[in-house]
């Protein structure tokens, strides 16, 4: 629910209720009522809250729960949290249907697996190749200067 997301996002960002209330032009008491769920903000205030927290209006008002994890915070604008996958004995994973639909992933589609010290990501091979091609073009231009 909205009230849970407001409390979670405020805590994640390290704001007090007073600070958030000030940012969107309301009283601390009004904001406290939103977090308690006794009242709800109008759509304009929700949009301001989404901007302050760097998320979307849609993410702000939805609750997302991940099996084995519980409720998760709204994703930042432009980012998604799709849920969990289980790694099979041979390293197989099933990519959630929402991800497959959004990115047009079907059987046989080639993905590039990337990582850093915190985790892994996958990107369609053609997208990776396009990024690499543009990088090479920029490097060539830079070398010509």
Image (cartoon, grey):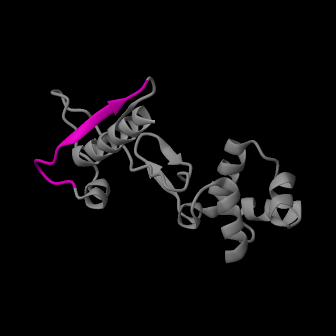
Q: Position of residue 111 (x, y in %)?
A: 22, 42
Q: Is residue 26 left or right of residue 114?
A: right
**Which residue occupies the foreground of this view, 119 or 8?**
119
20 within the magenta span = no
Give the residue at x 20% y 32%: 88
Q: Position of residue 130 (x, y in %)?
A: 29, 47
Q: Position of residue 30 (x, y in %)?
A: 84, 66
Specify the segment rendered in magenta. Answer: 105-116
Q: Residue furthest top?
A: 117
On-image quarter of the N terminus? bottom right
108 within the magenta span = yes
Q: Is residue 1 above or below residue 138?
A: below
Q: Is residue 21 above or below residue 43?
A: above
Q: Is residue 135 above or below residue 1?
A: above
Q: Is residue 17 left or right of residue 100?
A: right
Give the residue at x 37% y 29%: 115
Q: Is residue 122 left or right of residue 105?
A: right
Q: Position of residue 35 (x, y in %)?
A: 73, 59
Q: Is residue 72 left or right of residue 2?
A: left
**Which residue occupies the foreground of this view, 98 or 129?**
129
Q: Quadrant of residue 45?
A: bottom right
Q: How many marks?
A: 0
**Which residue occupies the foreground of this view, 14 or 134?**
134
Q: Residue furthest front?
A: 145
């Amino acid at each position: 629910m909205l009230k849970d997301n407001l409390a979670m996002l405020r805590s994640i960002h390290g704001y007090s209720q007073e600070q958030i209330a000030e940012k969107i032009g309301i009283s601390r008491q009004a904001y406290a009522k939103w977090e308690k769920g006794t009242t709800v903000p109008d759509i304009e205030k929700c949009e301001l809250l989404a901007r302050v927290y760097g998320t979307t209006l849609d993410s702000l008002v939805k609750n997302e729960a991940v099996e084995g994890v519980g409720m998760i915070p709204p994703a930042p604008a432009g980012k998604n949290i799709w849920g969990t996958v289980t790694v099979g004995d041979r390293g197989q994973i099933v990519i959630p249907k929402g991800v497959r639909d959004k990115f047009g992933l079907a059987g046989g589609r080639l993905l590039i697996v990337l990582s850093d010290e915190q985790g892994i990501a996958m990107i369609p091979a053609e997208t990776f190749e396009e990024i690499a091609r543009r990088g090479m073009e920029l490097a060539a231009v830079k070398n010509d200067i």
